[in-house]
Image (spheres, rainbow, N blue to C red):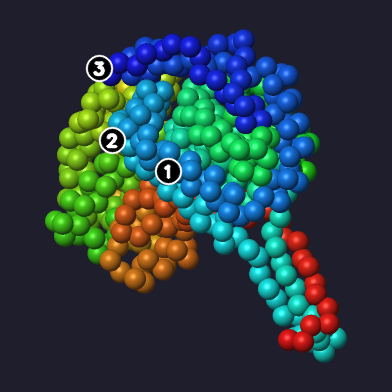
Amino acid sequence: MESVTATEPVPFHVAGAPASGDDVVTVRHPYDGRIVGRTTNATDDQVEKAVAAAEAVADAAAALPAHVRAAALEHVSRRLAERADEVARLITAESGKPLRWSRIEVTRAVSTFRWAAEEARRFSGELQRLDTDPVSAGRMALIRRVPKGPVLGISPFNFPLNLAAHKIAPAIAVGTPIVLKPAPATPLSALLLGELLAEVTEPDGPGSGLPAGMFSVLPLPNDRAAELVRDPRLPVVSFTGSGPVGEQIRRAVPDKHVTLELGGNAAALICSDWGSDADFAYAAARIATFGNYQAGQSCIAVQRVYVHEWLFDAFLPRLVEAVAALRTGDPFDEATEVGPLISTAAAERVETWVNEAVAAGARIETGGWRDGASYAPTVLTGVPPEAKVCAEEVFGPVLVVAPVSDDAAGFATINDSAYGLQAGVFTHNLQTAFAAHRTLRVGGVIVGDVPSYRADQMPYGGTKASGVGREGVRSAMEDYTEPRVLVLTGIDL
């Protein structure tokens, strides 16, 4: 078992400077409940100082040269890479994520900051000729994007490093201050990002790095977030988390620019042409892995699996075998593929939902049992469409598998959901791929793979109850900014 020493509380950062409060937060390992770290919640005065500093420094932040912003982002990327093993172990300690997946999350965060550094250098605007009409002869427009104002970022527990990076990195790239509130269950990874950002906060005086008010990382209980959300000095709110909380935010501040990355109910469709042994082996392995890789705690983890009816009886045993073979246990064990959920309460909820489905007629093909905060990777068949494990986001290691008559029926069944984040379509047929892209009401269609694929530079987000706006470095930079037009007159074009 990994040894983690919990000593003095880890400081957070207020306007770029380390700080501590009086209310101690104890972080426990979800697998066995041992203490893995401590920090403190920010006081009301510290929250006020952070927000006031963000407002005060907004103009200076917007005026930062691109090379300063890019250098700060490159520094964080480089330092994360240098400390990769340490950071991965920290993610596993506080979230219970298996170490193999924590290492991948660190690698992704390294890329997220690197991409942001590259985008900071090329986020230059657009030139438009206006002499397309005689009355505008000699005129040209320069359209640049400028920050809307300081950002409030609220990040979730399931990717405590990389989803915090997806709030912070685009803000620095466009030159806007950010106040980040990490998830109460997993604040330590975000605090480490604050530590790395502090290394480039005006290290040699004004103009040598990020201005002091450019960032704050504030641990806070969720019941204190509403005041921050309402604060008019933070005109942009970027939230990743549960649907009900996201909707509360949107209703509370209709005059703000709000981006919401909310829940999902990701589906995979096995099409009629996906029928060889190699196809089955690949799809079964990918679906098994990515239905369970975060103990199902990913909004694009596979939850629903639809299979052409003439392939169903052959594919189901392959999938069940692949799920049953997944290694569960201590997240620090290098062989573990599926760890615990974030808490015992979360695992108990999954257990309740599965039991409700079984009572309604579903069959457990494998799994279906709980041990503390861990829930066994589970495959269900015969699930009524209205059961929670099918209709809602289970956010646990549960796969619902059902037959469909053809591609069109599969697309319709995928669309029959309150959510619309991503979908996976296993096909070799280009026409089917384009039909899926045209038909499926989701933010992204992944062809030949699970819906769980995400590249950190691509637009990422959903429709319906899955949210509004897009993450992905460039997309978030656009969300944080608005166009400003400069018209030049009397130019010989």
Residue 29 position, x and y percent, is 38, 18
Q: Amino acid at mark 1?
A: Arg
- Give me the residue at 67% from left, 22% from top: 224
Decide which of 335, 389 is in the foreground and name it.
335
Q: Quadrant of residue 408?
A: bottom left
Per the image, the residue denoted by label 1 is: 78
Decide which of 61, 395 is in the foreground and name it.
61
Instruction: Determine whether 447 is above or below 153 in the image.
Output: below
> What's the mark number on residue 58?
none
- Give me the residue at 47% from left, 56% from top: 458
- Give me the residue at 69% from left, 21% from top: 46
> What's the mark number on residue 100?
2
- Mark 3 or 1 closer to N-term? 3
Per the image, the residue denoted by label 3 is: 1
Residue 438 position, x and y percent, is 47, 66
**Gap in angstroms between the C-alphas marked 3 and 1:** 29 Å
Report helix, strand or loop for mark 3. Answer: loop
Instruction: Confirm or deny contact between disc 3 and disc 1 (CB under 8 A).
Output: no
Decide which of 381, 60 is in the foreground and name it.
60
Q: Amino acid at mark 2?
A: Arg
Q: Amino acid at mark 3?
A: Met
**Gap in angstroms between the C-alphas marked 3 and 2:** 15 Å
Decide which of 398, 27 is in the foreground and name it.
27
Report helix, strand or loop for mark 1. Answer: helix
Residue 471 position, x and y percent, is 54, 49
- Mark 3 or 2 closer to N-term? 3
Question: In which quadrant is the N terminus drawn?
Answer: top left
Instruction: Determine whether 252 is above or below 434 in the image.
Output: above
Total label count?
3
Q: Quadrant of residue 212?
A: top right
**Gap in angstroms between the C-alphas marked 1 and 2:** 20 Å
User: For the residues carrying marks 3 and 1, which lies nearer the camera in this image?
Assistant: 1
